[in-house]
Amino acid sequence: MQQLKVFMLMAGLTALLVVLGGYFGGQQGAVVFFVLAALMNFGVFWFSDRAVLRMYGARIIGADDAPELYRMVDALRQRAGLPMPRLALAPSEQPNAFATGRNQGKAIVCVTSGLLKLVDKKELEGVIAHELAHVKHHHMLVSTVAATMAGSIAMLASVARWGAILGGGGRDGDRNPIGLLVMSIVAPLAAVVVQMGISRANEFQADHTGALIAGSPDGLASALGRLEMYSKRIPMRVNPAGAQLAIVNPLAGVRGDAFIGLFRTHPPTEERIARLMAL
């Protein structure tokens, strides 16, 4: 059911991109921005893992760098029926983690140095199992494609907004500048709502599957509460585009986040914990 929901949300986002391209630039505009989105998605498919690691300042590590972590991931990935992912370490004191990569064979599980210091073994297992669940359900690619398309819509809307402000009437002058201005504001919000739906569905599914991989929901539930607390106390510098991939919102302590929270891609941590404990 969750996979069907994700597919429907992706289809809706694609349709929104094409419709808006047609409104702003007619048939030619729809084709141009659809092709642009396709090219961007192709680039994301091949290079998203490197881009995300750069956002977090992370580096790939081997078994000799963190032997206990490597053994833990190896044991959990065998339970999940997955190939061994590459491991990465981000130099942030905020405890957090994410998974990236275009498929199961190219997956990377990244943890922060703070995560290794501030959670116990059972909580760390829960976090790793959650990230392996993202890998198992192919969530990483879906999330990055959704983010790319949302970015395309935002770019298109920005062009239309400035055109309306500067007095442009759209294609052949037959578009109402006020209508263009309104749609240029509504369109990015709609894209963010779709992106939120995809990310939240993924997080709930990864929590459930992660609990099964770990053998218990207790470690992940405890870790989520701890990570949420630390995310508000220990700041992390990361591009907001990559923040949605983390297990908890790494920008929770950013000033002005009360407004940003209205459009946060992560579901409420309290609800995630409650669902886990209901298992």
Image (spheres, grey):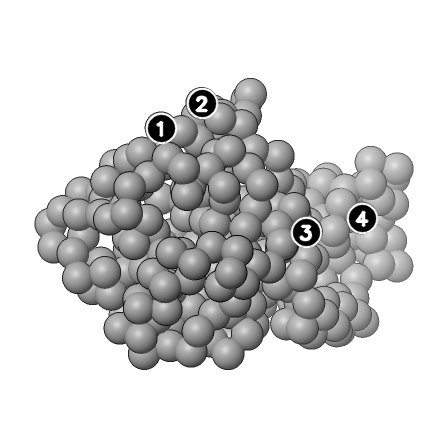
Q: CA distance from mark 3 to mark 1?
A: 25 Å
Locate residue 186: give its quadrant.
top right
Mark found first going from the N terminus, 3 or 2:
3
Residue, far left: 278
Mark found first going from the N terminus, 3 or 4:
3
Q: CA distance from mark 3 to mark 2?
A: 23 Å
Residue 155 lies, with reference to residue 182, above or below; the image says: below
Locate residue 279: give its quadrant.
bottom left
Q: Which residue is mark 3?
A: 54
Q: CA distance from mark 4 to mark 2?
A: 38 Å
Nearer-the-camera pick, 11 or 78: 78
Q: Position of residue 86 (x, y in %)?
A: 52, 67
Q: Which residue is mark 4?
A: 159
Q: Is residue 155 left or right of residue 264?
A: right
Mark found first going from the N terminus, 4 or 2:
4
Q: Which residue is mark 1?
A: 229
Callout 2: few (<14), some (14-19), or many (20+) C-alpha neighbours within 10 Å?
few
Locate residue 232: give its quadrant.
top left
* Circle 4 SS class: helix
Type of the residue with mark 4: Val
Q: Which residue is mark 2?
A: 233
- Mark 3 against mark 4, which lies toward the viewer? 3
Instruction: Tell me the quarter of the image containing the N terminus.
Output: bottom left
* Circle 3 SS class: helix
